[in-house]
């Protein structure tokens, strides 16, 4: 069988077989297409495997379990608003929290929980008790090793795809609780460190979306912890810089007890007044 050729184009008569040279040109394209299809169909790792890798990447469950309490000092800046706050967060097992916020512009604000009652107190709002989903969310977040014990803390976990956050390719995991909206966790595909955490929060203003972008991970007592973070809430960006993190320190007696104003408010509500 004869082939008619030009310098730029190869043609063949109807029914004629392809030459080997023609196949050599076509096979790499077909092979590349097959690889692309395989990559697209590659199954996602199981959410449980990803969560376990995350725990190991940040130090491992044993390192978390050695921590009885934590004191974190930080600066919180409201980007573009000229407002900066000093913050000290005290945490202790299982889910106790006392947070002190101070600023020359807004004065002093406090919030915390003794593990059962969640509250807020400031010069602007006075004493307030958290209720409903807001209380549930705060009590959950007060557990400093919540993610290390994710099987006990969450009702379920699901791999939800691969997404790019900034320039980082991430596994997306959806973590569900028995009540309230799910948490979306984005883990770096290479390091398994968290790049983004997204969730909806119930606030006095209603349900609002919040995105947190942790960074600058450093080792503290065997744990790899974020020392900076960016938070986007209600369209406002806040930047947090961690100054220090201390573990297993001597905490003042009664640190997590309810303030007098909160106790009075709780007793009043309990009496139906």
Image: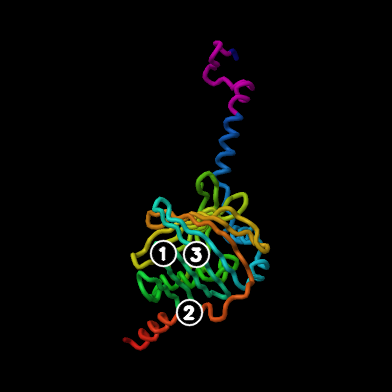
Residue labelled with disc 3? 87
- Measured as percent of width and height from the top left, residue 266 is found at 40, 83
| Distance from Cα at disc 2 to Cα at disc 3 | 23 Å
Q: Earlier in the sequence, mark 2 or mark 3?
A: 3
| Distance from Cα at disc 2 to Cα at disc 1 | 19 Å
The tag on residue 201 is 1
Q: Earlier in the sequence, mark 2 or mark 1?
A: 2
Q: Secondary structure at mark 3?
A: strand
Task: Identify the image's colour scheme: rainbow, by chain, secondary structure or one colour.
Answer: rainbow
The label nearer to you, 3 versus 1, is 3
Left or right: residue 159 versus residue 204 is: right
Left or right: residue 214 versus residue 66 is: left
Q: Secondary structure at mark 2?
A: loop
Outermost front residue: 104
Query: Is the C-beta separation of discs 2 and 3 under 8 Å?
Result: no
- Measured as percent of width and height from the top left, residue 102 is found at 46, 65
| Distance from Cα at disc 3 to Cα at disc 1 | 21 Å
| Closest to the observer, 66 or 45 | 66
Residue labelled with disc 2? 116
Query: Dot 3 surroundings within 10 Å: few (below 14), some, or many (20 or more)?
Result: many
Query: Dot 1 surroundings within 10 Å: few (below 14), some, or many (20 or more)?
Result: some
The label nearer to you, 2 versus 3, is 3
Q: Earlier in the sequence, mark 3 or mark 1?
A: 3
Magenta span dominant secondary structure: loop
Q: Secondary structure at mark 1?
A: strand
Q: Quadrant of residue 48?
A: bottom right
- Asked if one can make out residue 29 in the rendered structure from this viewpoint, the answer is yes
Left or right: residue 90 versus residue 125 is: right
Q: Quadrant of residue 27?
A: top right
Outermost bottom residue: 271
Residue at 62% in and 66% down: 246
């Amino acid at each position: 069988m004869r082939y008619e050729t030009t310098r730029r184009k190869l043609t063949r008569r109807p029914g004629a077989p392809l030459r080997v040279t023609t196949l050599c040109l076509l096979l790499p394209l077909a092979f590349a297409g097959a690889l692309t299809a395989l990559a697209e169909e590659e199954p996602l790792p199981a959410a449980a495997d990803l969560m376990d890798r995350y725990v190991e990447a940040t130090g491992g469950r044993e390192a978390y379990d050695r921590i009885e309490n934590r004191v974190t000092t930080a600066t919180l800046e409201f980007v573009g608003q000229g407002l900066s706050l000093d913050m000290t967060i005290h945490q202790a097992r299982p889910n106790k929290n006392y947070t002190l916020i101070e600023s020359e512009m807004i004065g002093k604000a406090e919030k915390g929980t003794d593990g059962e009652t969640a509250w807020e107190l400031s010069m602007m709002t006075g004493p307030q008790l958290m209720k409903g989903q807001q209380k549930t969310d705060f009590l959950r977040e007060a557990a400093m090793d919540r993610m290390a014990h994710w099987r006990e803390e969450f009702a379920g976990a699901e791999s939800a795809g691969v997404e790019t956050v900034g320039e980082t390719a991430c596994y997306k995991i959806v973590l569900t609780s028995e009540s309230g909206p799910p948490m979306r966790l984005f883990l770096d595909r290479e390091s398994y460190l968290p790049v983004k955490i997204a969730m909806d929060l119930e606030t006095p203003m209603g349900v609002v979306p919040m995105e947190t972008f942790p960074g600058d991970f450093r080792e503290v007592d065997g744990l790899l912890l974020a020392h900076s973070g960016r938070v986007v809430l209600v369209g406002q960006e806040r930047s947090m810089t961690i100054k220090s993190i201390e573990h297993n320190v001597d905490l003042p007696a009664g640190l997590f007890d309810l303030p007098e104003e909160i106790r009075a408010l709780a007793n009043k509500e309990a009496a139906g007044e």
